[in-house]
Amino acid sequence: MSDLEKTVAGCRGRQKRILELMQRERLDLVIVTRHEHVQWLAGPRFHWTFEPVAALAADGHLTLVAPTVTYKDAAADKVVSYESNRYSTLRNDQRDLSSQALRTALAGRPAPRRVGVEFSSFGPHLATHLGSELVDIEPEIYRLRRRKDPDELARLQTAIDATGLMYARAREIIRPGINELDVFNELQGVAVKHFGEMMTATGNDYQSGTRGGPPRNRAAEDGELYILDLGPAYQGYFADNCRAVAVNHKPTDDQQRACAKIC
């Protein structure tokens, strides 16, 4: 089974779990606007500058509204686009445009009485036009997301594998005098090469001799511990683990004892 087939199968399974929720809560429609939930239900991951939206009806019909410049194959019954760019320039009214496109796509369907939405991100562009009772299903979506499907596990494993490669490279290059920015750049390059694309995000801590923080234009010093908290994300799925490397590769007895207590 290809990665695309795994993603479509995973999305269809997640749609079925939302349909079960809809039946319990007597919902006629579910509209998701958070990027991660659109991806979770429909498949494609969109850049943060866009405002996609997905709507699942009680009959199982999924409508995806996608920006024109980033459309990919999706686990959707209907895909419509909105004009996200004009004359090669990103538009500022993304949410308004995607909301208009969804309203048009749903115009021929029965008017919903109860609609499940995410209260944290569901804005007036849709709310003021629905005339429906809105139900916050965001907590339930987060509960459902705790169960990972094969397509999600594959992305998580890819992200985790990247941390192994990044730490292997860190142990090769860390030494007294190396600049923190150089370490950061080297490790980012390892992850990007492994993913074959840009990372969704990276980790938090790339400083030597402190408890953590972003890389600085500073050289690591002999005797320091280099704290690395790496969290490379592949297509929205994050790894997250932390390691400490002795800059001179000769940890002191105190450092060894501290490591033993933690481990």
Image (spheres, rainbow, N blue to C red):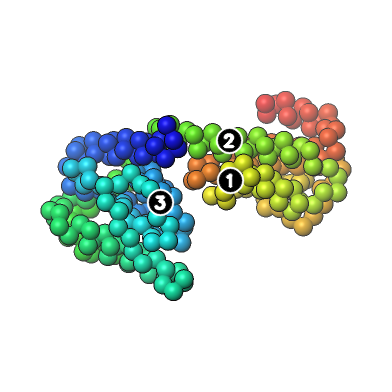
Q: Of the residues shown, which amino acid type is indicated by label 3?
A: Lys
Residue displayed at 76% across by 46% down: 208
* In the image: residue 149, left or right of residue 114: right
Q: Of the residues shown, which amino acid type is indicated by label 1?
A: Gly
Q: Which residue lies under the disc numbered 2?
A: 160
Q: Is residue 11 above or below residue 204?
A: above
SS class of the residue under badge 3? loop
Q: Distance from label 2 to label 3 (Cα)?
A: 25 Å
Pointer 3 or 1: first along the chain: 3
Residue displayed at 63% across by 38% down: 163
Q: Nearer the viewer, residue 257 or 223?
A: 223
Mark sitting on residue 72: 3
Q: Nearer the viewer, residue 3 or 185?
A: 3
Residue 214: image x %, image y %?
A: 67, 52
Q: Identify the image quadrant of the C terminus.
A: top right
Q: Which residue lies under the disc numbered 1?
A: 196
Residue 11: image x %, image y %?
A: 35, 39
Residue displayed at 12% across by 53% down: 110
Residue displayed at 74% across by 40% down: 170
Q: Is residue 158 above or below residue 52?
A: above
